[in-house]
Image (tube, rainbow, N blue to C red):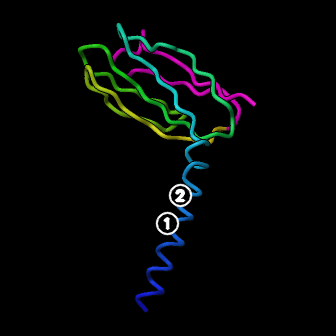
């Protein structure tokens, strides 16, 4: 019985190692910076059909709430902090996001392209 468990664990570990690079390769990483209550860049282009890891870095001293109804995302990011979101895969299209605390200046879009 002990031998079966060890063999099963070895097979599982080998499969996990084989699949991990594939899963990581399918996630595109994008960084957006909040500075002076604006997003830089305000337009992000990503391939449709891929998983996205979005890192939002808040360089302002005050917090900002990153929000997107289109992407179903919402998180308060403190001043000098960062937040990470993983979403997708996305269909081709335009997905709006904004900073709820500075909605007049903090606007942007993610454009998923074929």
Q: Residues within 10 Å of mark 1 (few under 14, many from 20)?
A: few
- Relative placement, left or right, of 47 versus 61 is right
Residue 62's image quarter? top left
Tell me the residue that label 1 is attached to.
Answer: 13
User: Residue at the spot x=43%, y=14% of the render?
Assistant: 106
| Above or below for 22 versus 112 | below
Say which quadrant the C terminus sits in: top right
| Label 2, residues with CA under 10 Å away: few <14, some 14-19, many ≥20 | few
Q: Is residue 9 above or below residue 62?
A: below
Residue 102 percent location from the top left of the image: 36, 14
The x, y position of residue 90, in whole percent, is: 64, 38
Q: Is residue 88 magenta?
A: no
User: Number of numbered discs present?
Assistant: 2
Q: Position of residue 82 (x, y in %)?
A: 33, 27
Above or below for 62 versus 69 = above
Callout 2: SS: helix
Work out how far the residue at label 2 is from the one at label 1, CA to CA, in angstroms.
6 Å
In depth, the one of 57 and 101 nearer the eye is: 57
Quarter containing the N terminus: bottom left
Q: Which residues are magenta?
A: 91-114
x and y percentages locating residue 31 in the rendered image: 47, 24
Residue contact between numbered discs 2 and 1, judged by CB atoms under 8 Å? yes
Residue at the disc numbered 2: 17
């Amino acid at each position: 019985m002990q031998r079966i468990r060890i063999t099963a664990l070895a097979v599982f570990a080998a499969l996990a190692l084989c699949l991990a690079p594939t899963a990581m390769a399918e996630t595109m990483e994008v960084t957006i910076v909040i500075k002076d209550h604006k997003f830089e860049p305000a337009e992000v282009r990503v391939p449709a059909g891929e998983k996205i890891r979005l890192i939002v870095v808040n360089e302002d001293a005050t917090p900002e709430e990153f929000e997107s109804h289109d992407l179903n995302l919402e998180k308060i990011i403190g001043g000098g902090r960062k937040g990470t979101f993983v979403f997708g895969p996305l269909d081709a299209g335009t997905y709006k996001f904004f900073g709820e605390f500075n909605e007049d200046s903090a606007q942007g879009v993610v454009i998923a392209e074929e």
